[in-house]
Amino acid sequence: MLNKITNLPMIAYLAISGFFHELKDDERGLSGVVVTVLLILIAVIAVFLVWGWLSGWLQGLFTQIEEAVDL
């Protein structure tokens, strides 16, 4: 068990380096990688936009609640 745990970083390094080596030697182009990066970027931007909208909406809602409680 301990042997497997101590070999884990080496196994992870070999797996990642093998992935990037195969990606570098892929002759089909980088269109799949570009599409993946763009999709991740769009998802992150969407999360920030939704979070900005929700935080403004929630702040207004809490302000209304505080005003109602102060009456």
Image: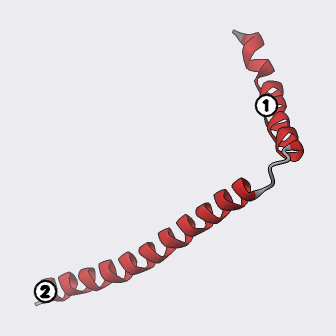
- Looking at the figure, which quarter contains the N terminus? top right
Q: Which residue is mark 2?
A: 68
Specify the amino acid type for callout 2.
Ala
* Residue at image coords 89%, 43%: 25
Local SS, label 2: helix
Looking at the image, which is closer to me, 42 or 63? 42
Q: Is residue 66 above or below residue 31?
A: below
Location of mark 1 (residue) = 15
Q: Looking at the picture, how far across and down is residue 11, in whole percent?
A: 79, 25
Q: Amino acid type of disc 1?
A: Ala
The residue drawn where x is 80% and y is 38% is: 19
33 vs 59, left or right, is right
Residue 54 relative to residue 45: left or right: left
Distance from Cα at disc 2 to Cα at disc 1: 58 Å
What colour scheme governs how the chains and residues are painted in the rendered image of this protein? secondary structure
Can you name the residue that lies furthest to the left here? Answer: 71
Residue situated in front as seen by the camera: 29 or 24: 29
Q: Nearer the viewer, mark 2 or mark 1?
A: 1
**Mark 2 crowd level (few <14, some 14–19, many ≥20, 10 Å Cα):** few
**Residue depicted at 62% across the width and 67% down the height:** 41
Where, by quadrant of the figure, is residue 33 drawn?
bottom right
Q: Position of residue 31 (x, y in %)?
A: 73, 58
Is 39 situated above or below 14? below
Q: Is residue 14 above or below residue 54?
A: above
Q: Percent x, y for residue 36? A: 65, 57
Determine the residue positioned at 82% across, 44% down: 23
Image quarter (top left, top right, bottom left or bottom right) of the C terminus = bottom left
Residue 22 vs residue 62, the one in the foreground: 22
